[in-house]
Amino acid sequence: MPTPSLTDEQQRYLDFLRVQRRLAERTLHLYADALQRLTGLAAVEGLDLLRLSAHQARRFLAKLHVQKLGPRSLALILSAWRGWYRWLGENGKVDANPIADLHAPKQGRPLPKALDVDDAVRLADHHQDQADPVAEALERCLVELLYGSGLRVSELVGLDVRHHAQSAGWVVPDAAEAQVLGKGSKRRAVPLGGPSLEAVSRWLAVRSQWAAADEPALLVGPRGRRLSADQVRKRLKHRALAAGLPTHVHPHMLRHSFASHLLQSSGDLRGVQELLGHANISTTQIYTRLDFQHLAKVYDAAHPRAKKK
């Protein structure tokens, strides 16, 4: 089916957006495509766009939905249609906007991306023979704290060596825990496992080679000051590449991995919620979907009845 042409009114609307609203060319192209879809749908049914009813517009939306367009694409198309009819109304061309009460279906919440257990361990255990031993100790420490304790990157960089009046968080190696300040200024204690404690201990043994004398931060860079979240991201990305991981790794992915792997092993959703510092259990429940995906993959790979004929 040939692509329908824009009507004169549609072209004038796009010109208005280009000149008066100064929309980017990419956006104008998407709007033009959306308006062409509208013209094509109306042409099939022999309908006059200037007399389109809300019921007819809703039928057009249903047809696009059947074409497997996603919620984001449908929302953009409806935005273009709604804007055009609003402009027509402002110019006295239509009496009502048939798109006013139409909305795209809600977009499903995307699943967080998590590493599998082998990749997470490989990232933590990776060692570069030629690496600066201080940098190596720092990176091992930050990976172990992100993956071993499920910290947010803001909680990680807020950690101090010891508690003082201005501390957002601090480590307590003797108690095998860290005190962190999470969202909503809520403080919680997170456990430090054996590998995390070992990594913290190794880092503290060399930290003085980089840290300024008056710097309270646990994690510091070569200039002696507290690591920023961006510096953590860059170091983690570099380490993941050096370890040969097949995906881009960022701090929150290690938090997702911590939660997913812990839930797979324990099944204790409330416990995972507490460790992550989630205010609502519904936030933590997304990891049950990750856990189900893992089980589904195991089933597909191993169960005789899962094999397609």
Image: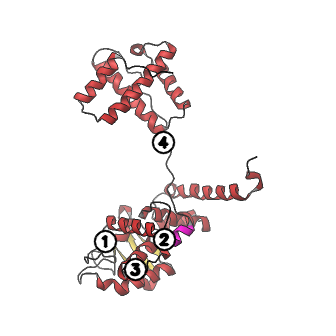
Secondary element at image label 4: loop
Tell me the quarter of the picture where residue 26 sits: top left
Give the residue type that dot 2 points to. Answer: Leu
In the image, is residue 120 part of the stretch drawn in magenta? yes
* Mark 1 and mark 2: Cα distance apart in space: 20 Å
Dot 1 or dot 4, earlier in sequence: 4
Secondary element at image label 3: loop
Residue hosting label 2? 123
Q: Please say if 299 is above or below 227.
A: above
* Mark 3 and mark 1: Cα distance apart in space: 22 Å
- Percent across and percent down for residue 103 are 45, 32
* Mark 2 and mark 4: Cα distance apart in space: 33 Å
Tell me the quarter of the picture where residue 218 sits: bottom left
Q: Given this view, does label 3 or label 2 mark the residue nearer the observer?
A: 3
Dot 1 or dot 2, earlier in sequence: 2
Is any part of residue 289 visible from this angle? Answer: yes
Q: Which label is found at residue 130?
A: 3
Q: Which label is found at residue 227?
A: 1
Q: Which residues are magenta?
A: 117-123
Q: Given this view, does label 2 or label 4 mark the residue nearer the observer?
A: 2
